[in-house]
Image (cartoon, rainbow, N blue to C red):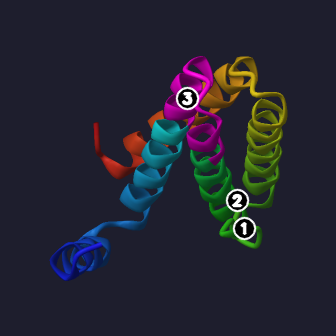
Amino acid sequence: MSFAFARYAEARAETTSPAQLVVALYDAALRSLRGAQISIAERDYAKKGAQLSRAHEIVTELRVTLDETRAPALCAELTRLYDYVRQQITEANLHADAAPLAGAILVLERLRGAWATVAGTP
């Protein structure tokens, strides 16, 4: 990554609301999952593994940053959904099968839509 790009990314993170950052994380996870679907179809297993690892890392980050003291019921539901998504990613990775990713993508798309409404972004 170039120095200029790193500075741009840092400045963007500093001026972006927390809700917009969450939307950006969902977008990145969804890009990785869709890319993994293509990689599986093309039998590019190295790329599939990298994309699924990235998506798994993002969903894990979303999970561990939940503040359960503020909204325990909501956090419990999000934990359940994130665990489901991570399980589907693992299944897709272990079996080089894109089918489990459809459910994971659906969950993340719906969550992204809700967060986008909160953030006031499209």
Mark 3 / mark 1, whichever is N-terminal: 3
Quarter of the image holding residue 63? Answer: bottom right
User: Measuring 68% from the left and 21% from the top, which residue is drawn there?
Assistant: 98
Please, what is the three-letter code of the amino acid marked with disc 3?
Ser
Give the x, y percent position of residue 10: 28, 79
**Region in magenta:** 33-49
Q: Nearer the viewer, mark 1 or mark 2?
A: 2
Residue 112, placed above or below residue 22: above
Using a 10 Å C-alpha cutoff, classify the residue at mark 3 as few (fewer than 14 neighbours), some (14 to 19) or many (20 or more). Answer: many
Q: Residue beneath label 1, please?
A: 64
Q: Residue beneath label 2, please?
A: 60
Q: Residue beneath label 3, please?
A: 39
Q: Nearer the viewer, mark 2 or mark 3?
A: 3
Mark 2 / mark 3, whichever is N-terminal: 3
Give the x, y percent position of residue 38: 52, 23
Q: Secondary structure at mark 1?
A: helix
Residue 38, placed above or below residue 112: above
